[in-house]
Image (cartoon, coloured by chain):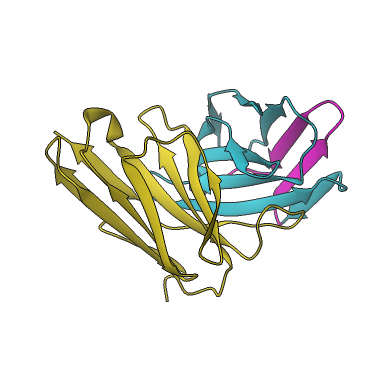
Amino acid sequence: DTAVSQTPKYLVTQMGNDKSIKCEQNLGHDTMYWYKQDSKKFLKIMFSYNNKELIINETVPNRFSPKSPDKAHLNLHINSLELGDSAVYFCASSQFGSSGANVLTFGAGSRLTVL
Amino acid sequence: KQEVTQIPAALSVPEGENLVLNCSFTDSAIYNLQWFRQDPGKGLTSLLLIQSSQREQTSGRLNASLDKSSGRSTLYIAASQPGDSATYLCAVDDYKLSFGAGTTVTVRA
């Protein structure tokens, strides 16, 4: 019944490794997002996809590559992990892109720890 | 570049007291402003969304106001309860959601 589900919930890995975080939403929403919440709890948008098409790509290193196989899924692949990538990554979805009534539904987060 | 500021960063009140959380933003060209709640180790839960043409929204004990011209929003929580303890985040949507750092609220029983 979970509306936006992310896996894994926790991920501990070594510097230099490549890892992926998966996200699925069963709300029928057209737009999906990845946000990063750092140690100071600041949430920043990384990517936004609308119907599998990239619409927002903030200043994120190209080691981060989102993939949207269909509009219900938005996965995040990270190459050559660095210590500074340690954070909680949140996936979210919404019915529309930016508009007056665009309410986002968030997943529970994936805590990535890079050693 | 949109900047969102929330004051205070933390707040501790006895049960039953009303809560007032403040949010300010620098660019008034927004689609909407949203308030979220985040519990420790959990995701965000949407509380209220105020569209740019609206002045306030209410849901139960929560009331949020929006003054776009001055770049301010206030979230009021009436008759606080220990279950209201959480971090409250304000976010403005001007083609993407920009978040404040949050106000961490503790309601003492």
Nearest the eye: B32 or B77: B32
Q: Please provide the residue range marked out in magenta.
A: B60-80
Image quadrant assignment for residue B103: top right
Kindly indicate which chain is depicted in yellow in the rendered structure. Answer: A
Quarter of the N terminus of chain A within the rendering: bottom left
- The count of marks equals 0
Q: Quadrant of the C terminus of chain A?
A: top left
At 76% across and 49% down in the image, what residue appears? Answer: B50
Instruction: State the hue of chain B.
Output: cyan
Q: Is residue A18 above or below residue B14?
A: below
In the image: residue A107, left or right of residue A81 = right
Q: Is residue B68 magenta?
A: yes
- Residue B29 shown left or right of residue A90 in the figure: right
Q: Residue visible at 52% across and 34% down?
A: B105
Q: Residue at x 49, y 37 (%)?
A: A44
Does residue B31 show up? yes
As for residue B106 lying within the magenta part, the answer is no
Place of residue B25 in the rendered image (x, y in percent of width and height, measured from the top left): 71, 28
Taking A21 as reference, is A46 left or right? right
The residue nearer to you, when weighing B24 against A96, is A96
**Residue B41, visible in the rendered structure:** no
